[in-house]
Image (cartoon, rainbow, N blue to C red):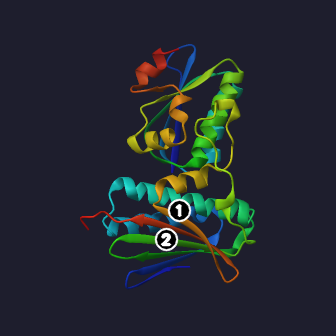
């Protein structure tokens, strides 16, 4: 139900593309996928949310946790092209002012 | 554990484990779509039910609810959809908890409470009520005027 694809578009940035729905059933798997990158020393992350049609508070908890871990390691987690519904969830939780959110994947990657 | 329909009332009984959360969401998607809600309201309704269901499994049943039940009852009237979610966990009203602050900084943010926060934001009314010895959360979503 959730697919996580990780690539390295350049030497420093790691792109994590997720598709499916992120809910309380699979949020742990989603968070583990993100945290694995940080544990591997890849701390400049871009999370592409264009194929995530649904995300509840369980998913938000994971991205906030990952953002904290990335920042502690002098990195960042930046978001790219969230769907309208996911963007609303982010805004409702006030996370649109905490995350850097980009309209395109390239903008997010090139922001580092 | 199945689903039945009688007039405008439907009921789904699920066991209290997290693997059932998608059945709860699918049920609400079906009910709201058939009631003529738009895509945004369908999303908000299923998210609200997921949050309540998850709270019951994680906090009410403490992940030991496989042999316990969560009932979801929907009542559709001309102007609104009522969703009742009932459980057998120790009596507790989650609506009494302090709400998290969406304006808090990254480092000051509370980890919990966001589920109920979304429920309040996305539904038109949210209430807690005792049904005998059962907890119940009652959600209301107003129907689109054109329906």
Q: Which residue is mark 2?
A: B83
Secondary structure of the residue carrying tag 2 is: strand
Q: Which of the pair A63/A41 is nearer the observer?
A: A63
Residue sitting at 70 percent across and 81 percent down?
B133
Identify the image quadrant of the N terminus of chain B.
Answer: bottom right
Identify the image quadrant of the C terminus of chain B.
Answer: bottom left
Q: Of all residues shown, which one is farthest toward the bottom?
A: B6
Residue sitting at 40 percent across and 59 percent down?
B42
Are callouts 1 and 2 both on one chain?
Answer: yes
Residue sitting at 24 percent across and 64 percent down?
B146
Q: Residues within 10 Å of mark 1 (few under 14, many from 20)?
A: many
Q: Which of the pair A38/B7 is nearer the observer?
A: B7
Residue B47, position as x, y percentages in the image? 50, 56
Residue B40, position as x, y percentages in the image? 37, 53
Quick check: B140 left or right of A23? left
Residue A24, position as x, y percentages in the image? 60, 53
N-terminal label among 1 and 2: 1
Residues under labels 1 and 2: Cα distance? 8 Å
Q: Is residue B53 visible?
A: yes
Q: Are marks 1 and 2 in contact (CB under 8 Å)?
A: yes
Q: Residues within 10 Å of mark 2 (few under 14, many from 20)?
A: many
Q: Is residue A24 visible?
A: no
The tag on residue B49 is 1
Q: Is residue A95 above or below residue A22?
A: above
* Chain letter behind tag 1: B
* Chain letter behind tag 2: B
Q: Nearer the viewer, mark 1 or mark 2?
A: 2
Q: Is residue B91 above or below residue B41?
A: below
């Amino acid at each position: 139900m959730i697919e996580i694809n990780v690539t390295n578009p350049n030497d420093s940035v790691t792109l994590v593309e997720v598709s499916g729905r992120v809910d309380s059933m699979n949020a742990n798997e989603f968070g583990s996928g993100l945290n694995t990158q940080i544990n591997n020393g890849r701390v400049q992350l871009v999370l592409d949310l264009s194929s995530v049609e649904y995300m509840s508070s369980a998913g938000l908890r994971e991205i906030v946790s990952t953002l904290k871990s990335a920042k502690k390691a002098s990195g960042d987690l930046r978001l790219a092209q969230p769907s309208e519904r996911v963007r609303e969830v982010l805004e409702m939780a006030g996370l649109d002012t905490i995350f850097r959110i980009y309209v395109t994947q390239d903008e997010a990657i090139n922001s580092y | 554990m199945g689903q039945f329909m009688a007039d405008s009332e439907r009921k789904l009984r699920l066991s209290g484990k997290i693997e059932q959360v998608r059945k709860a969401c699918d049920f609400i998607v079906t009910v709201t779509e058939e009631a003529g809600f738009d895509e945004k309201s369908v999303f908000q309704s299923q998210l609200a039910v997921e949050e309540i269901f998850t709270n019951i499994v994680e906090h009410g049943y403490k992940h030991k609810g496989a042999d316990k039940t969560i009932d979801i009852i929907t009542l559709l009237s001309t102007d609104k959809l009522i969703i009742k979610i009932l459980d057998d966990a120790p009596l507790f009203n989650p609506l009494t908890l302090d709400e998290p602050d969406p304006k808090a900084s990254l480092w000051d943010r509370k980890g919990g409470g966001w589920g109920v926060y979304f429920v309040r934001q996305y539904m038109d009314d949210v209430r807690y009520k005792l049904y005998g010895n059962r907890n119940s959360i009652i959600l209301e979503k107003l129907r689109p005027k054109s329906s």
